Image (cartoon, rainbow, N blue to C red):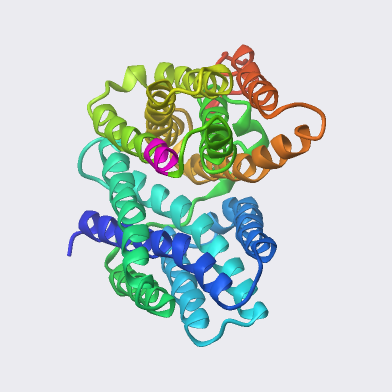
Amino acid sequence: MSDRFASLAVAFGFALALGIATVAIPLLALGSGYDPAAVGFLVAAAAGSQLATRVALPWLLGRFTDRSLVLVSVALMVGAFALLSFSSVLPAFIVAQLAQGAARAIFWTAGQTHVIRGGGGSTVHRLVDFNLAGNAGTVTGPLLAGFLATTSVSLAIAAAAVAAGVALLLSPALATYPPFDRRQGAGTARLLRREGVDVAVWATFVAGTWWSMLGSFVPVLAVSAGLGPTDVGLLVSLSEGSGAAMMLVVRWLSPVRIQRIVRLAPLVEMAALAGIAVAPAVLPVYALLVIAAGAAGGAVTVLAPALVTQTATAHEHGDAIALTGLSRAVALLGAPATVGALLAIVALPVALVGVAAVNVLPILAVGRTRALATAPGGRPG
């Protein structure tokens, strides 16, 4: 089995398990007698674990091969679902969610660095294929979970364990690349100040803000404006679908245009968010806005990692990819909390416009050449 096929198959299996879990774990918790507040706590536990793990990823990538980290992440997913298959007590749920959050952080970062280091086609082509394989899993997983849950939620959990188990069996087929030598890099702090890396980190943060709003306050705003649950589901699907479509478009993008697109995409996402906050509650208007934001988010998903490979040296790729992942995790956890806090003093549309405005302010600073932010050996960053 080729390394490229193995990486795509592992990504699909991991994402399929993750997609099933998105539906099955809340249903299992509710069916086990836990209230909605407890379900929210379990989701937050996974998000917190993911964020904490991303902080440690530069260190992990400097000491272990990305293949080993992929194996560990998939094994954590298998263990999480196996545990829930045998027990639904609260400690089991907490351990499973902590394991799942850590697995998500490790897998997507280690998986991206592995794909970037592989051969065969351009970096953008490889990242598009990897992310589309993941998208196929996260789209299929919830549908499969809903179908299986009509018979038994436990059956859906078992299916997630099987999907992750298949990914675990395929993971040893991945090629082995040495750990990153962080001594040959500029260090995380200086890397963050480098032109290109700073753009990618900011763009990924804004993309995380958009996806967190799409999964939280955008549906709340849509329902309060009179749209029904079916309309909300359609909006989410349109955003996800436009993101996947954009990945196919940027597969053929010239490398010289990558930074320009990555700088533009956050502006599109936040303009769409502000537009949703102030636009009339008409489904076609909302649909156009979520399609635009989803397409911009899809472009960032592929092009932000590609941009850091243009700027960072080979031994800095791990640190740079980890930085982009960390910024996304911070946004996914922090943006909804920020809007929730703002609702104590302002209405939801005002809070969304305020968050959008703050997110675009870094455009004034990122992507500018800095004399101090040069790559090792004097090469401009």
Tell me what residue is drawn at x 39 percent, y 75 percent: 161
How many marks the image carries: the answer is: 0
Q: Quadrant of residue 297?
A: top left
Q: Position of residue 323 (x, y in %)?
A: 57, 41
232 drawn magenta: yes
Q: Is residue 354 left or right of residue 154?
A: right
Please tell me which residue lies in front, 59 or 355. Answer: 355
Q: Position of residue 291 (x, y in %)?
A: 37, 27
- Between residue 190 and residue 128, name the one nearer to us: 128
- At a point 77% along the width and 32% down the height, the residue shown is 342
Instruction: Answer left or right for 163 relative to 229.
Output: left
**Residue 75 spot, x, y in % from top left:** 45, 73
Residue 205 visible in image: no
Most frequent secondary structure within the magenta stretch: helix
Residue 358 located left or right of residue 233: right
Quarter location, residue 78: bottom left
* Range shown magenta: 230-236
- Let me know if residue 114 is in the magenta part: no
Quadrant of the drawing holding the N terminus? bottom left
Which residue lies most toward the bottom here? 86
